[in-house]
Amino acid sequence: MTTEQLVKQIKSKKSFLCVGLDADLTKIPQHLLNAEDPVFEFNKAIVDATHHVAVSYKPNIAFFEAYGIEGWKSLKKTIDYINEKYPEIFTIADAKRGDIGNTSKMYAKAFFEDLDFDSITVAPYMGKDSVEPFLGFEEKHTILLALTSNEGAFDFQTKTVDGKELYKQVLEISKTWVNSQNLMYVVGATKAEYLADIRSIVPDSFLLVPGVGAQGGSLLEVCKYGMTGNVGLLVNSSRGIIYASNESDFAEAAKAEAERLQKQMQDIMIDAGI
Ligand SMILES: O=C(O)c1cc(=O)[nH]c(=O)n1[C@@H]1O[C@H](COP(=O)(O)O)[C@@H](O)[C@H]1O
């Protein structure tokens, strides 16, 4: 999917909501455990209930890998279902990969070609030759971890290297890589106060912003400092939406929570004249 197609969808849905598909068998409604593929049934119900207000889905691969071969089958069914039924929706493989170039190329093939995701999250730690193999795919996007939502972000990402914080070095240096137009960046919603500085380095890039909902980040703060003329944000909530209820009404509860967030996004977009 091109960035233009993503922006068009954001403007028509008046939403920049990304729903995280992080299904945990101990948390999903217990009646689903009788299904042949409980993870897929859960994801399908969440997607069907929220697709009208979500512009993106982000299955976190850990929540599939944890169930071995069955988990990979659930992942394949989930992404195929979204791509077939809702092809306009931007999909993110939250896999946080990155390795020597030869290996990164195979990760890129797995997620872009075999599974046909629109994008993947990638760690910048191994540098240019570990990320560039992901950047060479047309109409696919690489979402580089810049400043993450967790407490451990302060262990390395905000430390000063050569007179500048490491997350700023990641943003600046990655802009010089081949096909850097295919880069987006992860910035945690819990780090909203850093967004003005981030925007001074990457004024137009799309940012994936997880951390509203369960992690307590503020949508308003994120938008105040991070929004661009084309919105430029995909704000993710996983547990806050998918576990809004763990009873038989889980899909309706997820729908209500997704609609509540979309309404806030719509108001923010109208205020910003978008
Ligand atoms: O790359 C991510 O999506 C990510 C980056 C980050 O800095 N923080 C973060 O929480 N995430 C992911 O975003 C989702 C957040 O889930 P909730 O806290 O349940 O909304 C999880 O899948 C995390 O792995």
Image (tube, helix red, strand yellow):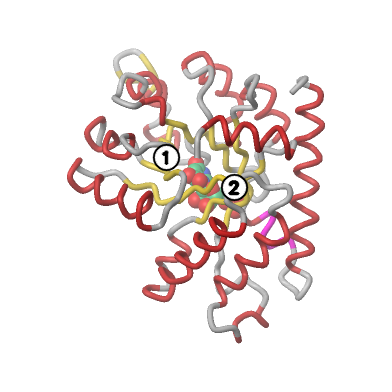
Going by the numbered disc 2, the residue's amino acid type is Ile
Pinpoint residue 71: horizontal percent, then vertical percent. Answer: 44, 71
Cβ at disc 1 under 8 Å from ligand 1: no
Q: Is residue 10 above or below residue 61?
A: above
Q: Is residue 238 above or below residue 164?
A: below
Task: Give the main secondary structure of the magenta stretch.
Answer: helix
* Residue where numbered disc 2 is placed: 89
Residue closest to the eye, 61 or 36: 36
Going by the numbered disc 1, the residue's amino acid type is Lys
- Measured Cα–Cα span from mark 2 to mark 1: 13 Å
Cβ at disc 2 under 8 Å from ligand 1: no
Q: Quadrant of residue 248?
A: bottom right
The reply, left or right, for residue 28 in relation to residue 202 is: right
Dot 2: element: loop
Pinpoint residue 29: horizontal percent, then vertical percent. Answer: 67, 75
Q: Residue at point 48% right, 63% down?
A: 63
Outermost residue toward the bottom in this view: 34
Q: Is residue 82 one of those drawn in magenta? A: no
Q: Earlier in the sequence, mark 2 or mark 1?
A: 2
The reply, left or right, for residue 216 in relation to residue 64 is: right
Give the numbered dot on residue 140.
1
Q: Quadrant of residue 230?
A: top right
Residue density around tag 1, few if under 14, some if 14–19, many if 20 or more, within 10 Å: many
Q: Residue at point 37% right, 52% down?
A: 111
Query: Which range is magenta?
Result: 240-244
Residue closest to the eye, 24 or 133: 133
Q: Quadrant of residue 209?
A: top right
Pinpoint residue 43: horizontal percent, then vertical percent. Answer: 60, 65
Q: Is residue 241 one of those drawn in magenta? A: yes
Can you say which quadrant of the picture contains the C terminus?
top right
Dot 1: element: loop
